[in-house]
Image (cartoon, rainbow, N blue to C red):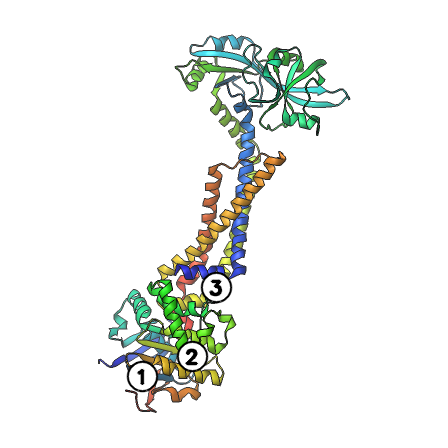
Amino acid sequence: MIWVAFQMLTGDRAKYFGMLLGISFATLLIAQQSSIFCGLLLTASSQIYDAKDAPIWVMDPGMQFVDDIKPMSENELWRVRGVPGVAWAVRFYKGLGRARFGDGKFQQVMILGLDDAYMVGAPREMVLGKLEDLRQPDAVIMDERGYRFLWPGQPYTLGRTFEMNDRRAVLVGVCKASRTFQTFPILYTRFSQAVRFAPQERKALSFILAAPQPHLTAKEVALRIEERTKLKALTRDEFADVTIWYYLRRTGIPINFGTTVLLGFFVGTAIAGQTFYLFTVENLRQFGALKAMGVTNLRLVGMLLFQGLFVGIVGYGLGIGMAAGFGILSERSDRLSFYMPWQVMVGTGLAVLLIILLTSMVSLRRVLVLEPAQVFRA
Amino acid sequence: MADIAVRCQQVTKVFGDGEPVHALRGVNLEVPFGELALLVGPSGCGKTTLLCILAGLLYPTSGQVEVLGHRLETMSANQLVRLRMREIGFVFQQYNLLPSLTAVENAAVPLLIQGVPRREALQRAGEILHQLGLAERRQAYPHQLSGGQQQRVAIARALVHEPRFLVCDEPTAALDAESGRRTMELIRQVAVRPERAVVVVTHDARIFDFGQRIIYMNDGKVVREEIPHPRRG
Ligand SMILES: Nc1ncnc2c1ncn2[C@@H]1O[C@H](COP(=O)(O)OP(=O)(O)OP(=O)(O)O)[C@@H](O)[C@H]1O
Ligand SMILES: [Mg+2]
């Protein structure tokens, strides 16, 4: 009878495609929006993971997320270094600056200042040039996205110069860096250089990056640092989570995306549900005849659920495929961060399952209360 | 009792609880195996209601209903479903074929319900379509068939699982005179067998001569029975 159910479903092309449309539309919207949402969250925390050699981030206790800079005094570095279990602790500068180019144009940039000696937090991957060249006077390394933004269509050329806070900066390399919320070009430089590039501030120590001694975990050492210095010390993952949570709680991002996801859910349910209901009602006489001929209610439920699940699975496949296609396109165009983890796929699948259940529920009711004797009435 | 397929004693049926409708008011009836009985009478006299009770689709309000040796009023709903699946064939006025199944697939449905493998079911359905003169239309969909052809597919479907009891409600009502006669002829030729009883509800006087027994009903009762032709062996 499952075969009969399958024939009934696919035989009615218009309704079959209608249901597929509803489900795949809902899937597309839910998966795509969730993935962009995940991409944004990832963007929020990506700078933290870009500093891949820093297991512990130490900061002012008032800081709430990665872009909320409250500089510390130089003393704190020495106090952190004094905490037992700390293998090393180095300076890390993060701040905004203004670059002025030869043609008089200005551009806001994000300055990342690496410890002069250890270069902790250096770019993950160089595209052009060498990291060591950062030790040269006035040297900066720019991320490729920033380079393409400033000099669109031009090949990567080293040796370009511009001014930062009336000081000369020389481009010695181009590197990869994760996308950030600010979308400003990112400049890597030495800490001592960064302080000079940035607008004058009393304190310049944005973060202290630290590592635990080999026999200790980052978490243990972070706790010790907090105890001894009253600064905030977080492991890399904790800091990423804190940052993500900040955006979740304090911005309209979740509401925006949540609304669209819900919209997709309801519109999908409405389209699929309505079509499925119509399909059931149109086949009500046939279902009644099947009942008369000895099909139990249980088997009818099975047939309807099979029809629903089949549409659900095919529609889900189409929708996820389209969402993934969208993801690949946006990845290529580099406009939008798109990240579809398995949780998004499973979550979307569950949403589709819910749609199917809601959808079949209405139809099931109609078929279950149907009196088989009714088929003899015109 | 052995040759009686269907027997009713004092069967009543009351519909509704607000203002009760007495659809049947004490029906007594016997239909032997091997016979085609016509159930006739004016509109609203209770023919369809009686047919539904005989086919195990409705419970009687009171009285005894014995079909193929089963006392239907004592059986559970699930037992009735099983009885219908195995032993009863149905022909409806509106055919009620599945639109997205071909003729042969439609005819195979009762076997599929019983769990017969699809290949075998389709083969047996093909054979019975052949008997009904639809061999070359077996792959047609219902909407590609005339009313008479659709009703023949429905008859094939009603007989494919070799039920011992066939019920038809107004099988010719939607057909023109010629198709109606041809349909009844087929029912008589193909459906009537020594081991099977057939009950056909109709108010189409043109087909009365196909019945081996004509049961006249009025106002919820059997008022008269006629046996126009000598019964077959
Ligand atoms: N489900 C029901 N609920 C209430 N009344 C019903 C129901 N089914 C039938 N009736 C009533 O029972 C009576 C007998 O109906 P039935 O359909 O058996 O008549 P019929 O002889 O088949 O008529 P027709 O020739 O028009 O098909 C009618 O008065 C009808 O209105
Ligand atoms: Mg009737």
User: In which chain is the residue bearing label 1?
Assistant: B
| Res B19 seen here | no
* Element at label 2: loop
| Res A107 seen here | yes
Determine crowd level at label 2: few under 14, some 14-19, many 20+ residues with C-alpha closer than 10 A: many
Residue B127 occupies quadrant: bottom left
Q: In the image, is residue B71 above or below residue A366?
A: below
Determine crowd level at label 3: few under 14, some 14-19, many 20+ residues with C-alpha closer than 10 A: some
Between residues B219 and A160, which one lies in front from this camera angle? A160
- The residue lying at 56 percent from left, 28 percent from top is A44
Determine crowd level at label 1: few under 14, some 14-19, many 20+ residues with C-alpha closer than 10 A: many
Q: Which mark is residue B35?
A: 1
Residue type at mark 1: give it. Answer: Glu
* Element at label 3: helix
Residue at the right extreme?
A103
| Quarter of the image with the N terminus of chain B in it | bottom left
Circles 1 and 2 on the same subunit: yes
- Left/right placement of residue B201 relative to residue A67 reads left
Q: Position of residue B96 (x, y in %)?
A: 44, 71
